[in-house]
Amino acid sequence: MVVAVVMWSGVNVAVAEQTGQKGRRHRPMVMTEERVERMLSRIGQTNPEKAEQLARLREKDPNEFQKRLREHFRQEFGERSWGQKAQSHSGRGPHGGHKMTLPGMMGKGPMGERMWKDHTDFISWLTENYPDKAERLQKLQQEDMEAYFGQLGSIMRTYKHIMKASKRNPELAGVLKEDLRLKKQRSELLAEIKAATDEGEKKQLENQLEKVVADRFELIIKRKQIQYEELLRKIEHLKEQVRERKNEVDSLKSQKADKVKERLEELLSGTEKIDWD
């Protein structure tokens, strides 16, 4: 019987044969580029900060990156399993096995349900904000599930932080979207400048690049301002909590004699009115 072993958001998917023998181990995972992309995407679903750290380490020290990546999944899934068994209820695969479906690949239980919800939430947001990319993903999903998850991981690393920002601060999300557009324009202009042979055209492109850089700098200032204002709101909230706790402490101090007497009565009568723990 052939069983597909998958990893959400990276879902690749290593296909292993089950012989029915208990305790048989799968072969070591081969760290291909596609598999690495999917594994990073899987981490990004539950721990975006960790995924970003690993992505930076990948560029700086590839060997250490692979070591850390393996360690992360060993800790999360255990030494004996690198993934979850894909479940399927929709037809047959190309070799007579069950065809894997998206919900089935997320696995069962609370974790699988959360993965499926995260996936559908992201696709809904992408469809609303970047319909062309959502359309390409949908087409890829129908043609090649493994390639779909590889592309999904790449897109999530680019856009997931914007989606998260849109939920807590739409203004910040707008800034991030515009910044992403300008970075794309910057890269295109740099390529055109490099390829330009006419000095007049090159100068024109450089002027456009200067404007893009200036616009991005303005966005950086705006983003920092928004983050500063968010921090101020958090500080005010903390101050309010501090005031409430101080008032609570002062109130308890002033009522000490009465509360001790009440507690004594509670202990003797077997009823409690205040949490003494």
Image (cartoon, rainbow, N blue to C red):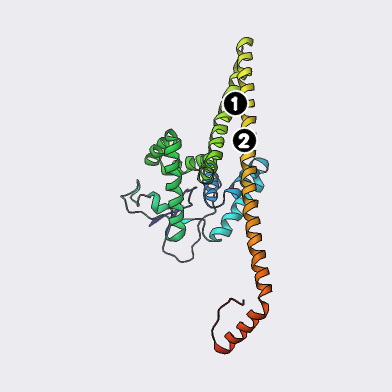
Which residue shows up at 65% across the image and 46% down it? 63
Residue in the foreground of this view, choosing between 132 and 58:
132
- Viewport quadrant of the C terminus: bottom right
Q: Is residue 159 visible?
A: yes
Residue named by callout 1: 186
Q: Secondary structure at mark 2?
A: helix
Q: Secondary structure at mark 1?
A: helix
Which percent across, then down, holds residue 183? 58, 30
Which residue shows up at 57% across the image and 33% down it? 179
Question: Image check: 267 left or right of 146?
Answer: right
Disc 2 crowd, CA 10 A, few/some/many (<14, 14-19, 20+):
some
Which percent across, then down, holds residue 189? 59, 22
Q: Amino acid at mark 2?
A: Lys
Which percent across, then down, holds residue 153? 50, 43
Q: Amino acid at mark 1?
A: Arg
Which residue shows up at 62% across the image and 51% down it? 234
Residue in the foreground of this view, choosing between 253 and 176:
253
Which residue shows up at 61% across the image and 14% down it? 204
Which percent across, then down, holds residue 168? 53, 46
Q: Image height check: is 220 above or below 233?
A: above
Q: Residue furthest left?
A: 91
Q: Image height check: is 243 above or below 120?
A: below
- Tag in front: 2 or 1: 2
Q: Image height check: is 73 above or below 209?
A: below
Q: How many marks?
A: 2
Disc 1 crowd, CA 10 A, few/some/many (<14, 14-19, 20+):
some
Question: Image check: 121 left or right of 212?
Answer: left
Residue named by callout 2: 222
